[in-house]
Every structure is written in C-alpha cells, then in structure tokens.
Image (cartoon, rainbow, N blue to C red):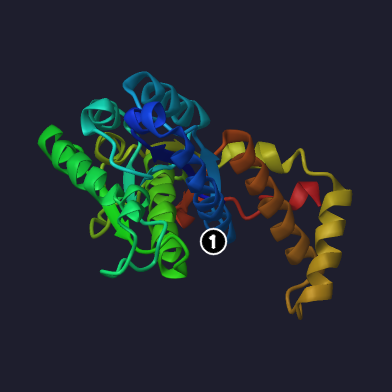
Amino acid sequence: MKPKVGLLPLYLKLYDDTMPEIRSAFSGMLNGIVARLTKFGIEVHRANVCRVRDEFATAIAQFEESDVDLIVTVHLAYSPSLESAELLAATQLPLLMMDTTLDARFPQSVDPMRLMYNHGIHGVQDLASVLRRLGKKFEIVAGHCEDERLFERTSVHARGALAAKCLRTTKALRIGETFHGMGDFAVDDNLLREKLGISVDQIGIEPLENRCATISKASIAEEYERDCEQYEITASEDTHKRSISVGLGLRKLINDGGYNALSLNFLAFNDPEIGRAHV
C-alpha cells in the first residue's frame, strides 16, 4: 500500500498582484518535491498554488474526496495564516508542514532580492502559531528542497498516517469465542470500536465450512502442486489437501467480508472432518 499525500503549496496573492513574474521560479521546486516524494513510494495529489481562503477550501475538499492519508504543506513564500488555518484545523486529515527553501545557502553576500524566494519560514511560523491556538495537531520537517533526508522524514510521517488510518478502519474477523479466562491481551469489542475504530465480527465454524464447500477440486490441486514445488512436504496428501481446502475457504471468507484482521480460537475447530468432503 502506498501512502497518499495531498501536497498543498501556500503563497501570497499580493505577490501575484504586484510581482507576477516571481511565482514561476517555484515551478521547478514543486516538481522536484513531487518527484522526490514519488521516489520514496508516496502517491502525491498536488493542489494548485493556494493564496486565499476559497482556494484553500477547494484544495482541502479535493484532498478529502481523494481520501489522502496526510496533508503536506509547502510555503513558497509568506502566506497569511488566517486564509488557511481554520480550514486546516477543521479537516480530520493529519497535517505535516514541510519547511523548505529554494536556495540551499543564504550568506551575507547574497542578493537581497533572494529574500523573495526564501522566506516561507515566516509563513510556517505564523501558521504553526495559529494552529496551536486552534488545537490542531501537526508535525514539521525541515530541510533544503533537494535534501534526500527531508523526504525520507516526510515519508516516515506519511507511512505512519497510513498505518493510523488502517488501524482506525480495521474490520476484524474472529472465528470462535474469546478464550475463557484469558485476559492479558483481551480488549472489549466496544472499547476497540470506540477508541480505535476497530470493528469485530465473531462467527462460528459453520460459515467457514460453507466457504470450503465452494472450493473446487481444481483449485485445491493447483495449490497442492504449488506447495510441492516450493516446500518439502512431510504430511500425507490427504491431510495436506484437507488443509488446503480449509485455507482456501478461509481466504474466501476473509475476502468476501472485506476483513483485514483475523483471530482464531482453536477450540472452535472441533470437527475433525472439516475440509475432507471437498477434497
């Protein structure tokens, strides 16, 4: 699974009104950011450069519709926080602020005009302060826009956001009841749903037996041949094929129900003949 990020470039409308030629200098920087994020295995949904509230609202709505895992902001210049802060605070999408610059160095000898291309940090400071007041959590990564370490850190946050979303949308299948008396890692199903968003469906052995009945002998034979090619088999052919029948039935049960987590209580498997009739 690839993490999906919404890349949100922030800018100032005043600059477009008074110095429209400046903005084109950031095209290469944005293209490079997308390319480097892609290199780290991230799917990037890039918004148009945003300057005023309506533009931010459109971009964030597009991110939500695309179901991105993380919004990554990039300040191309100073951008007044009140144009975007409330919208970013209101979305349920997690937020990462990428604090980066077009130039890698800024010594005393530099042309003062380069300030126009390297002062996004002022927008980062403004937005971060207001987001804290609004109670919106966020993270920051900083570095030059060509520094691989910047994108490595960003990718870690993106994968963490994806993992968190997967956890909150987990649909778990449990075959059999919880083991009576075992409490060291037992968590009430209602608590899992309320605190972590994990739903649990508990079933008996019958639905699995029904799925086993739909597995063809040809499918079992194909799986058996693949196993024999890849592994040294010590079980009898009958036992092996019965195991395959149950395994394929379980896969079908999982796929049909859209489950992405599984728990089994061995005490539920009390029929020694399960899988035999379908081999």
Q: Image quarter for residue 195?
A: top left
Q: Is residue 120 visible to the viewer in this orientation of the structure?
A: yes
The residue shown at (86%, 66%) is 225
Q: Mark 1: which amino acid?
A: Phe
Residue to which mark 1 is pinned: 40
Q: Position of residue 80 (x, y in %)?
A: 24, 33
Badge 1 element: loop
**Considering only vertical position in the picture, is 133 above or below 279?**
above
Q: Position of residue 205 (x, y in %)?
A: 55, 42
Q: Is residue 171 visible to the viewer in this orientation of the structure?
A: no
Crowd around label 1: few <14 · some 14–19 · many ≥20 (10 Å): some
Which residue is most to the left? 133
Count of number-bearing discs: 1
The residue shown at (23%, 33%) is 81
The residue shown at (27%, 57%) is 185
**Considering only vertical position in the picture, is 50 above or below 272?**
above
Query: Which residue is nearer to you in this view: 167 or 8?
Result: 8
Which residue is most to the top? 54
Lateral position of residue 31 relative to residue 158, left or right = right
Q: Image quarter for residue 99?
A: bottom left
Query: Which residue is nearer to you in this view: 199 or 60?
Result: 60
**Considering only vertical position in the picture, is 255 above or below 275?**
above
Q: Position of residue 113 (x, y in %)?
A: 34, 52
Lateral position of residue 229 relative to residue 211, left or right = right
Query: Which residue is nearer to you in this view: 165 or 22?
Result: 22
